[in-house]
Image (cartoon, rainbow, N blue to C red):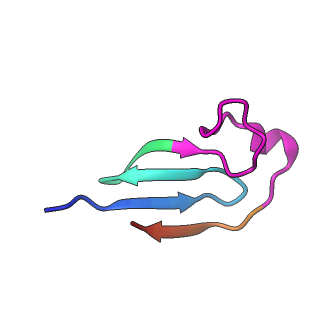
Amino acid sequence: MADDVVIVAKENGPYLVMKEGKVVAALCRCGGSNKKPFCDGTHAKIGFKAPQAEVKV
């Protein structure tokens, strides 16, 4: 049976890649991270604003 992978775009934050209900990666979506493609928290410092969303893969 294939495991579900879900990508959740957190409100004003990163994309969270989740497998079996656990976060396996946080990906930058503000464009400001110094550790791209991973989130380093820059979104909070620069005031990034974006709505929450969820994609089932």
Any magenta on residue 42?
Answer: yes
Q: Position of residue 41 (x, y in %)?
A: 70, 37
The residue lying furthest to the right in this view is 46
Quarter of the picture containing the N terminus is: bottom left
Image height of 1 relative to 17, above or below: below
- Residue at coordinates 70% horizontally, 68% vertically from top-left? 51
Residue 5's spot in the image, x, y percent? 36, 59
Question: Is the residue 19 above or below the residue 52 in the image?
Answer: above
Q: Residue 6 versus residue 11: which sits nearer the camera? A: 6
- Extent of the magenta region: 26-49
Relative to 51, is 16 above or below?
above
Among the 4 quarters of the image, the one containing residue 24: top left
Q: Residue at image x 61%, y 40%?
A: 37
Which residue is at 35% across, 54% downward? Answer: 21
Is residue 30 highlighted in magenta? yes
How many marks the image carries: the answer is 0
Q: Which residue is situated farthest in the front direction here?
A: 37
Figure quadrant of the C terminus? bottom left
Secondary structure mostly seen in the magenta stretch: loop
Q: Give the quarter of the image for residue 45.
A: top right
Q: Going 75% across and 63% down the picture, which residue do you hit?
A: 50
Locate residue 51 relative to residue 49 in the image: left or right. left
- Can you give x and y, in whole percent of width and height, for residue 28 in the image? 65, 45
Residue occupying the far top of the picture = 34
Q: Where does the image place residue 34, in percent across and percent down from the top left? A: 73, 30
